[in-house]
Image (cartoon, helix red, strand yellow):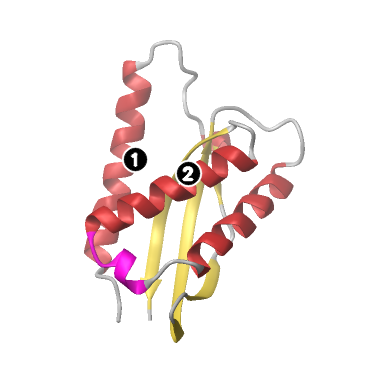
Amino acid sequence: EKIHADVVKAYADAAVAELLRDQAGDHGARDISAEHIVPLEPIITNIAGASKTWLRFEGLVVLSQRPKDDRSTLTAQISQDLMGLLRSTTLRQLETAAGLEFLREDMAELARLRSKGLARDIIIKTLVVE
């Protein structure tokens, strides 16, 4: 079963719009620049409860500032955490817009924990279940 691409694109557009709206409302925040939006390596994994069902995730992590250490190490650690979360996700959790929002919130929380608060958000570019 495939998640409709238009739904995921609309969700990603809404997430970016919300991020920019938050930035505009917070005058003390630093501007988001290209160096603060970092692509994650694509994740391909099977999901819980269905050994023949695969999920492909592509996303971006939004950082509040440039990491002190190598950012490729940080993004690799975040990707590993996200893979663990995605493996424990069921197809039923991904069937609704609310389910996708909960997944994104869980992903963002994992990224914040792994980066010790450096990661502000996760943007889902692609999420395909097959």
User: In the rendering, which numbered label is found on residue 4?
Assistant: none
Q: How many marks?
A: 2
Tell me residue 44's x, y (percent). 53, 73
Residue at the extreme right of the image, as rendered: 69
Magenta segment includes 92: yes
**Foreground pick, 91 / 15:** 91
Q: Is residue 17 magenta?
A: no
Dot 1 lies on which element?
helix
Q: Which residue is mark 2?
A: 108
The residue beneath circle 1 is 16
Kind of residue indicated by mark 2: Ala
How far apart are the alpha carbons under marks 1 and 2? 14 Å
Which secondary structure is most common in the magenta stretch? helix
**In this picture, residue 19 sits left or right of residue 52:** left
Looking at this view, name the residue that lies furthest to the bottom: 52
Which quadrant is the C terminus positioned in?
A: bottom left
Q: Secondary structure at mark 2?
A: helix
Q: Which residues are magenta?
A: 91-96
User: Which residue is depicted at the point 29% across and 47% down?
Assistant: 13
Residue in the picture at 30% in, 77% down: 2
